[in-house]
Image (cartoon, grey):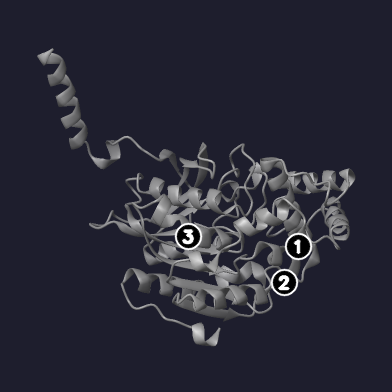
Amino acid sequence: MRHFYAVILLAFLSALSLPAAAQPSRYLISAQPMADTPPGTQAWRVQYWTTNGSGQRLAVTGIVAAPMEAIPPRPRRVIAWTHGAWGIAEKCAPSLSPDFFPYSAGMSAVRSGYVVVAPDYIGLASPTMHPFLVGHDTANAVLDAVRAAREIPGAAAGNAFAVWGESQGGHAALWTAISARSYAPDLTLVGTAAAAPPTDLAANLAQGSDKNARALLLSFALHSWSTLYGFSLDSITNRTNQGIIRRLSENNCVSFNKKPKLGTILGILTIARATKNKDIARIEPFASFERANSVDPARVPGPLLIAQSSKDTIVAPAVTRKFAKAVCKRGTLTRWIDMTGDHGASAKDSAQETIGWITSRFDGNPPPNDCRRI
C-alpha cells in the first residue's frame, strides 16, 4: 500500500514539473503549422473545445497567428479577431479559404507584435449548424479560442486580450465583451472594437438600404435559427421559398472576388420580394429571438471603439449611432470613428486607428471619449 501511494505521489510531482508544452491541454485539440503565411507571420490551423449556449461541448476550428520571431520573455498581447459574414455552411469557414489572410483585416496586427486569434465560430468547418448572430454561442467560441491559443508554445500568448470584429464579427465582439467576465474569468479583456456591428437585429435586418444583401443575410438567419431551434418558416413564406432560403444558405459563401451565379441572384431577388412586407420583428418566435440576441448597451463594458461608415448599405448607420448614444448614456468611454467607405472595408479602413487604440489600452493609457460628438 505504501508503494502504491509513493507511485501516485511521484506521478503528481512529475506532472507539476512538466514544461508548459507537455501539460495536458484543456482547450486545444490540435495546432497544425501553416505553410503559406504573410511575411513575418507564423500561423497554425487549430481545433479546440468550446461550449454552446446550452452547455454542449463542441470541437471547433480557427487560426492563430503570431510574429515570426523568438519567443519573448513576457507573454505576447492578444487580439481576438472576429470575422464578418462568410456564410453559414460548413464549407464557408474563413480558415478553409485561400482568401483568409487578404480579407481578414485583423491579421495586420501581427506586424505590431500581437498574437491574433481568429475563430471560425461554431458550425463553420465543423458539422453543426452555424448559430448565425447568436450571442452566447459565438462569444463562447471566441473566448475559448483565446484560451486555446495560450496552449500553443510558439505563440506565447498571454491572458490579456482585446477583441476586434467587423460586421457579424462586430456583433461577436460586443457579445464577447458581455460574456468575458462570467464565462472566462481567467482572461483579462482590455478593450472592445467593433466595425459596422449589427446591434439591434430587428432594425439591422430591416433597415439596410441594400435590399438584396438584406435578403441574403435574412436567409442565413432564418435557415440557421429554424434548423437549430425548430422555428417554422410558415408564417414568413411558402414552402417553395423556404426551399430557396435553404439552397441560398447551404450553397453560398460570401464571395470577395467572384460574381455570384445566376441562380444565386435569382434566389436572392425572389426572397427579397417574398419578404418585402414581412416585419420579422412582429412574428414569433423570431421577434423574441432577435431581441434576445441583440446587443444590450447596458451590458457592454468599456472601453469601447465603434467604427461606422455613413455610406454603409448593409448595417444602417443610424442604428449603430443610436446604439453608441445608448452606450454613452450609460457612461461607457467610447471612441467613435466616422468613415465613408463601403461596408466590406469597415475594419480595413479603420485598422490603423483601431490597432493604435488597442495598443494604448494595453499600455494602460486613459481611454479617449467621443460621446459628446456622437
Determine crowd level at label 1: few under 14, some 14-19, many 20+ residues with C-alpha closer than 10 A.
Answer: some
User: Does residue 57 appear anywhere in the picture?
Assistant: yes
As helix, strand or loop, the secondary structure at mark 2 comes to loop
Could you give the CA–CA distance between mark 3 and mark 2, rounded to whole angstroms?
Answer: 27 Å
Q: Residue at x 36, y 53 (%)?
A: 185
User: Does residue 41 appear anywhere in the picture?
Assistant: no
Earlier residue among tags 3 and 2:
3
The number of numbered badges drawn on the structure is 3
Q: Furthest-top residue in view?
A: 1
Residue 260 located left or right of residue 172: right
Q: Residue at x 57, y 45 (%)?
A: 122
Could you give the CA–CA distance between mark 3 and mark 1, rounded to whole angstroms?
Answer: 28 Å
Q: Foreground: 288 or 87? A: 288
Task: Examine the rendered structure and indicate whether residue 272 appears above or below residue 140.
Answer: below
Q: Which residue is mark 3?
A: 178
Amino acid bearing label 2: Thr
Q: Which residue is mark 1?
A: 213
- Residue 313 is labelled as 2
Q: Foreground: 128 or 265? A: 128
Q: Quadrant of the N terminus?
A: top left
